[in-house]
Image: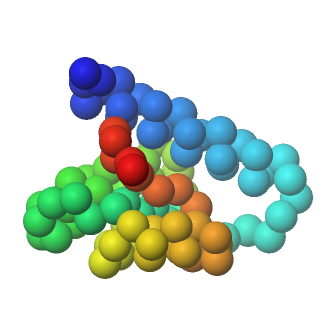
Amino acid sequence: MIRLPLLLTAFLAAATLLLFGTACGGGAEEDALIITAIPDGDEDDMRAAFGALAKHLEEALGMPVRYEHVQDYRASVTALANDQAQLAWFGAVTT
């Protein structure tokens, strides 16, 4: 079983690589990094947990980071596909 610190480290590494790639790609600057996650728990708990992650990323990266809650897995995928989110947590086990 993967422990939470390892998952958080992987998530942060992915965010860093995403930001590095965006900065090097010469694309348009976005106002904020938007993160989302599949809803696998209580909405209020998820907003609190991912809100804290967004705050940590914002401080570490020096740019605005915002968590956007979605209603289901499909909405997370759609948000990524439509560039409404740049990073998504799909959980440890996605079927």
| Number of numbered discs visible in the structure rendering | 0
Position of 78 relative to 21 (above/below): below
The colour mode here is rainbow
Which image quarter holds the N terminus? Answer: top left
* Of the pair 23 and 13, the residue shown nearer to us: 13
Q: Nearer the viewer, residue 14 or 60?
A: 14
* Furthest residue in direction right, as rendered: 26
What residue is shown at x 38% (from left), y 48% (from top)?
Answer: 94
Q: Is residue 55 visible?
A: no
**What residue is shown at x 65% (from left), y 47% (from top)?**
18
Residue 4 versus residue 18 in the image, above or below: above
Q: Quadrant of residue 9?
A: top left
User: Can residue 90 be seen in this snapshot?
Assistant: yes
Q: Position of residue 32 (x, y in %)?
A: 55, 68
- Residue drawn at x 34%, y 39% is 92
Determine whether, in the image, residue 72 is placed left or right of residue 79: left
Which residue occupies the foreground of this view, 78 or 46? 78
Residue 11: percent from the left, percent from the top? 45, 39
Vertical relation: 84 (above or below) 51: below
Indicate the position of residue 93 as horizontal and vertical percent values: 34, 42
Q: Position of residue 13 (x, y in %)?
A: 53, 33
Question: Residue 43 is drawn in which quadrant?
Answer: bottom left
Residue extending furthest front?
A: 95
